[in-house]
Structures are given as structure tokens and as C-alpha cells.
Amino acid sequence: MNDPLCFCNSGRTFELCCKPYIHNVSCPETPEQLMRSRFSAYATKNFQYILDTYTITQRKNLTLQVLSQGGDDSHWLRLDVLDTFTDNRTQAGEVEFVAYYRQNNVIYQMHERSKFFREEDQWRYDSGVLFEDGGVYKPQRNDSCLCGSGKKFKKCCI
Ligand SMILES: [Zn+2]
Ligand SMILES: [Zn+2]
């Protein structure tokens, strides 16, 4: 039996990658692991996990309803982590990534540098700065799909 690969594009199975975090079996040990698990939580529409992994300050301004309204019609296709940085002294970290998602049959790419802080012994997401090269993503006709299925785009996620 082949276990499905993780949504976060790590090349590992979901079971051994982001699932234990999302199901609160273990805690991410680095900002990158937290970032990846939050992506997988968006992909599986686990908005409670998204909410719980915001910093305390940010969480005050958020509700499950707000998060799910923004995320319910997005289909997350792929994550590429470009850079990651952890400062163990200040308990802060950063992750730069590109994420691809489909909304109403249009594919978008989102390029962000996120800030993470460690509080209550856990890494939490605080905020992110978007790069200007995000926006509508136009795959070439015969490109293989971003989701990694190996199929052509037009026969897969579009
Ligand atoms: Zn993962
Ligand atoms: Zn696909």
C-alpha cells in the first residue's frame, strides 16, 4: 500500500510529515516545519490548526469563521520553501516560500516571507510580507501539473 505524499511537497508521506503536527500528536521543532504543517492544514481545511498556530497577539483578531471564509474555496496545490532562518537566541524565525492555489479555475502563486516566534514552548506564525511577483500563474499548455502527480496540467488540477 502506498501512503499518500504530504501536501507540503516534502517528498515524505503525510503520515510521517505534517499529519502528527496537525493532529496535535507532536509539535513542529522549526519554523519551517510549522510553516509546512500550516500549508497542509490549509490544504486539508483544518482551520482550527491554523488558528491555534498563530501567535497569541494575532489570534486575538482572528476567528475560525474568518479563516474558513477566506480559505474554503481555495484548493492548495503546491509549496516550495525557498529559504529558512532560525535564531535560537531570540526565539524567532523566518521562512520564505511560494505557494500555489486554485480559486474559481484560476491558479495563483503567492510568494511570502513569514515571521515566526516561539512562545509557550511552541513555534507560532506571526505575519508575512508578500513579494510583488505573486498573482495569477499561467502554466504552459504541456507543463506537468504543479501538484506533482506527473500528469499534464490540463488533465489534472485545472
Ligand atoms: Zn508535510
Ligand atoms: Zn495536479
Image (spheres, rainbow, N blue to C red):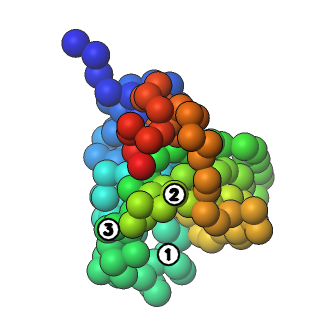
Distance, label 2 to label 1, CA atoms, is 32 Å
**Residue, disc 3:** 72
Identify the residue at image location x=64%, y=66%: 135
Tag 3 near tag 2, CB within 8 Å: no
Picture layout, residue 105 above or below residue 67: above
Q: Quadrant of the N terminus?
A: top left
- Amino acid type assigned to the residue bearing label 2 in the image: Ile
Q: Position of residue 110 (x, y in %)?
A: 62, 60
The furthest residue to the left: 1
Numbered circle sitting on residue 107: 2
- Amino acid type assigned to the residue bearing label 1 in the image: Ile
**Residue, disc 1:** 56
The furthest residue to the top: 1
Give the structural element (helix, strand or loop) at label 1.
Answer: helix
Numbered circle sitting on residue 20: none
Q: Nearer the viewer, residue 54 or 157?
A: 157
Distance, label 1 to label 3, CA atoms, is 23 Å
- Foreground mark, 3 or 2? 2
Please state if 111 lies on the left or on the right of 3 as rendered.
Answer: right
Q: Nearer the viewer, residue 31 or 101?
A: 101
Q: Position of residue 28 (x, y in %)?
A: 49, 44
Mark 2 or mark 1: whose residue is earlier in sequence = 1
Give the structural element (helix, strand or loop) at label 3.
Answer: loop
Mark 1 or mark 3: whose residue is earlier in sequence = 1
Picture layout, residue 118 above or below residue 141: below
Identify the residue at image location x=33%, y=77%: 69
| Number of other residues with Cα within 10 Å of mark 3, as a class: few under 14, some 14 to 19, many 20 or more | some
- Amino acid type assigned to the residue bearing label 3 in the image: Asp
Q: Position of residue 153 (x, y in %)?
A: 47, 39
Q: Residue 53's image quarter?
A: bottom left
- Foreground mark, 1 or 3? 3
Q: Is mark 3 within 8 Å of ligand 2?
A: no
